[in-house]
Image (cartoon, grey):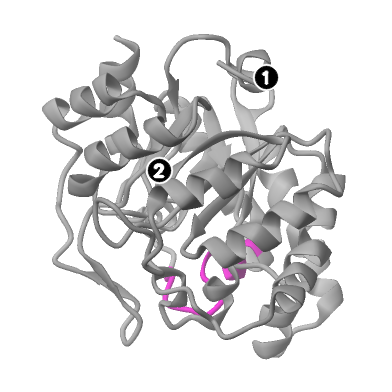
């Protein structure tokens, strides 16, 4: 273990939550909106806390806030105000904090990629055509608000592109005392979604002194084991993985094509642990029942 990981989580295995949108859907919420979980956050923050609480009750050691798709630019594009976006970022941390009150679980503030606000699947492609300066400015304004809201750590997640990772590393330098992990989306068992070697992406993430863990998320679970081995060879930081339920995101109708149903296979989880995963959870398509089974296996 290195940096701040052990002070937050100890030396044992760590279970992350599952897909926040998936759990909200199980409660009857419609996620087919450009603000995604951000809309529920605006309309019913107690529903966000309830979904987080389901994961904590299922054995999750970490809940990831509903800030993934919240930004000033995204809110303005949706007909809202910059002030509403800033308030929603704070509310996302407050809602997660309410869910873990009195429990042994940590709050990670989600820092999603620029592509998430475009609502066209860009977080699975990268290569936005933006300058480094534009990416730095985008992440700097919301990351500062999230840090001030007081999470335990930042979950910089679903990053498809080394160029965006470099911009975020620059912004993280503004907040050297706030621990973070950085996880990437992968196109195959060797490359990010933008086509760079996963080893190169991990090296960029690990260059930030505040990044205490690296990994992949919202990636097909069948790709994860070889990715862990490559990431382990590139860095000695803890490895964080939270795959989706498989399949590919269809931005036309806001659904996952050919997703796997049911929990992760126990044999697959065992392979992830043996390969070197320190923290394991789920992303899109995984709900509290998946995390309950995962926690029973990982902690058992």
How far separated are the C-alphas under marks 1 and 2? Answer: 21 Å
Q: Which residue is mark 1?
A: 102
**Residue at 60%, 58% in the rendered image:** 165
User: Magenta stretch containing residue 105, yes or no?
Assistant: no
Disc number placed over residue 18 in the picture, else none: 2
User: x, y percentage for residue 7?
Assistant: 68, 14
User: x, y percentage for residue 208?
Assistant: 70, 42
**For residue 279, what is the image quadrant?**
top left
Q: Is residue 163 left or right of residue 95?
A: left
Secondary element under disc 1, as helix, strand or loop, is loop
User: x, y percentage for residue 192?
Assistant: 38, 60
Secondary element under disc 2, as helix, strand or loop, is loop
- The quadrant of the picture occupied by the C terminus is top left
Q: Which stretch is magenta?
A: 30-41
**For residue 59, what is the image quadrant?**
top left
User: x, y percentage for residue 202?
Assistant: 50, 45
Q: Is residue 146 left or right of residue 67?
A: right
Q: Looking at the image, can residue 63 be seen? A: yes
Sequence-first disc among 1 and 2:
2
């Amino acid at each position: 273990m290195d940096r701040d990981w052990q002070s937050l989580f100890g030396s044992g295995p760590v279970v992350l939550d599952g897909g926040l949108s998936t759990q909200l859907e199980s409660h009857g919420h419609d996620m087919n909106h450009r603000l995604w979980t951000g809309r529920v956050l605006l309309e019913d923050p107690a529903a966000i806390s309830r979904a987080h609480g389901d994961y904590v009750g299922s054995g999750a050691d970490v809940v990831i806030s509903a800030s993934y798709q919240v930004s000033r630019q995204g809110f303005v594009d949706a007909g809202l105000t910059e002030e509403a976006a800033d308030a929603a970022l704070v509310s996302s941390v407050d809602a997660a904090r309410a869910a873990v009150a009195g429990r042994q679980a940590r709050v990670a503030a989600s820092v999603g990629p620029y592509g998430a606000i475009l609502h066209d699947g860009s977080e699975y492609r990268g290569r936005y055509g933006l300058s480094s300066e534009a990416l730095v400015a985008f992440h700097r304004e919301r990351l500062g608000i999230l840090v001030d809201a007081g999470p335990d750590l930042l979950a910089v997640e679903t990053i498809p592109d080394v160029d965006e990772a470099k911009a975020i590393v620059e912004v993280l330098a503004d907040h050297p005392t706030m621990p973070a992990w950085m996880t990437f989306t992968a196109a195959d068992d060797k490359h990010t979604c933008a086509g760079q070697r996963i080893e190169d992406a991990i090296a960029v993430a690990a260059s930030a002194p505040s990044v205490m863990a690296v990994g992949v998320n919202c990636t097909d679970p069948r790709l994860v084991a070889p990715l862990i081995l490559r990431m382990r060879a590139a860095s000695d930081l803890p490895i964080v993985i939270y795959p989706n339920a498989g399949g590919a995101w269809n931005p036309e109708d806001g659904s996952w094509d050919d997703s796997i149903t049911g929990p992760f296979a126990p044999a697959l989880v065992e392979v992830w642990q043996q390969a070197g995963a320190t923290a394991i959870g789920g992303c899109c398509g995984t709900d509290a029942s998946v995390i309950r089974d995962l926690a029973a296996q990982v902690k058992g």
